[in-house]
Image (cartoon, rainbow, N blue to C red):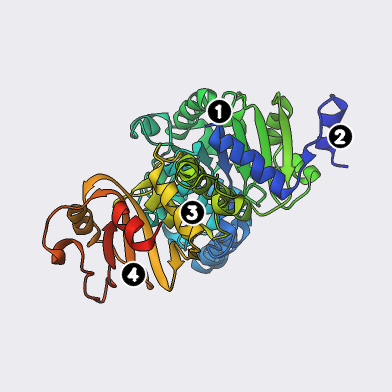
Amino acid sequence: MDVTLVLFLAQGARRMQEISFDTGVATALDSVINTRLTLLAGAGLSMAPPSLLPNAAALAATAKRRYDALHGATRQPLAVSVEDQAEFFFQRGELASVYFRTLIDSHAFAGPSNSGHFAIADLLLVRGIQTAITTNVDVMIENAGHQLHGQVGAGIDQQSVALLSPDAAPLLKIHGCRTIDPTNMVWAPGQLNAPPVDARIASSAQWLLGRLLDRDLVIVGYWTDWDYLNAVLTSVLGAVSPSRVIVVDPADGATFATKAPALYALGQKVPNAFQHVRASGADFLAALRRAFSMSFVRRVLHGGADDYEEATGAPPSIALTEPPDLDNETLWRIRRDLEGCAPTEPCTSRNPPNESLPGLTILQLRARGATADGPFWLLNGQRIRVLRTPNKPLHRVVAAYQRETAPAIAPELVIAVGAEAQALPTNIAREGSPPTITRGTSGRWITRPEAVQELGL
């Protein structure tokens, strides 16, 4: 057993409790619903496919090859580890001007966002994650937010996150960011006690005291070879007091105690639970995002249950109120329609609107035999889209959605729930748009009362 772990246990500290993947996701979902979830994402998150960012050893090996090729026997060979290399150039005053600029591949932190990045971005945009902290300097979470039509609010210290919108759930990048301040990313131990990094870390630590107090903290993607991260985490998280800590990673608990003593010590202080899910962080976050989306759709369906029972004389069956088994992308599109997002808007609601008609409409469609077909409902060979459009003239809704890029397979019918038809020419509000390169046919648009009559709901 590792010496660090022996020490903790000798002092009466408890081990991490290993829990199942499903239990961990369910626990984290409760934290989302109860506005208690905070997140710490380590460098390992961006190493998951398809992102596949290089680890510290790979970056260091590339930098060493470049440096040694430039100088050969005229200088001492460059150190092997990133930490030693960065400290060497920091002490020479060349960390940004030489090491970051010429020896570290400028494309090393670029790549496609993975499912974990999308989950964090989505949950930040709806404020399901109250606060996220990352040791990554890449912008993959922010890029994922852009693809979800939203702007994730990111900052590198207390001052920068304080400038974010009051409605934003902040992403604190405690090691800096390649786009916000690329010359002062934290890679060398000497930076921790030198300006401007020392002040940044101090302000971040103070800010996190309140943000993480009595919250549930999920830690993902930590086990990597970026050893120098421990010093920053010790400084920033040393005094925080979360209520629960869930560590998500394939490695065992003993490895975590050795690799991340500061985080392991943090887990010993929590009053509720110190738990461990042996799984990929990206997979766990993707499952959490899907569980949240399923819960959102389920709540919409249940929101229409009373009206359904009043109309039919019987409550809807579980088969009608349970969401279909769909992937994250499809569920996100359904959430956007049920929230009533405009074509260029992200999902921003953690809870569904307090309205019964969207849920009632889907319950009635399913009772008639409609089945899920992507984000639409297939009834008698016709794809139907249910879109929340409260208190709006139908022709204005249609005009607004003409800018939307339609999916490869577009619906034949769009039910604009809450919209009101007006006496306008049919070519404005009833006919579908002709197909173009960027937009397929938008289908025929009708109000809910028209759908009830036409479809026999």
Label 3 to label 4: alpha-carbon separation: 30 Å
Give the numbered dot on residue 397.
none
Between disc 1 and disc 4, whose residue precedes? Answer: 1
Q: Is residue 82 visible?
A: no
* Kind of element beneath mark 3: helix
| Residue 412: mark | 4
The answer to whether the residue labelled 3 contacts the one labelled 2, judged by CB atoms less than 8 Å apart, is no
Residue 410 at x, y = what percent?
Answer: 35, 70
Residue 4 in the image: x percent, y percent? 80, 36
Q: Which residue is mark 3?
A: 118
- The residue shown at (59%, 50%) is 317
Identify the amino acid type marked 2: Val
Q: Which residue is mark 1?
A: 212
Question: Along the line of sight, which residue is nearer the eye, 49 or 21?
Answer: 21
The answer to which of marks 3 and 2 sits earlier in the sequence is 2
How far separated are the C-alphas under marks 2 and 1?
28 Å
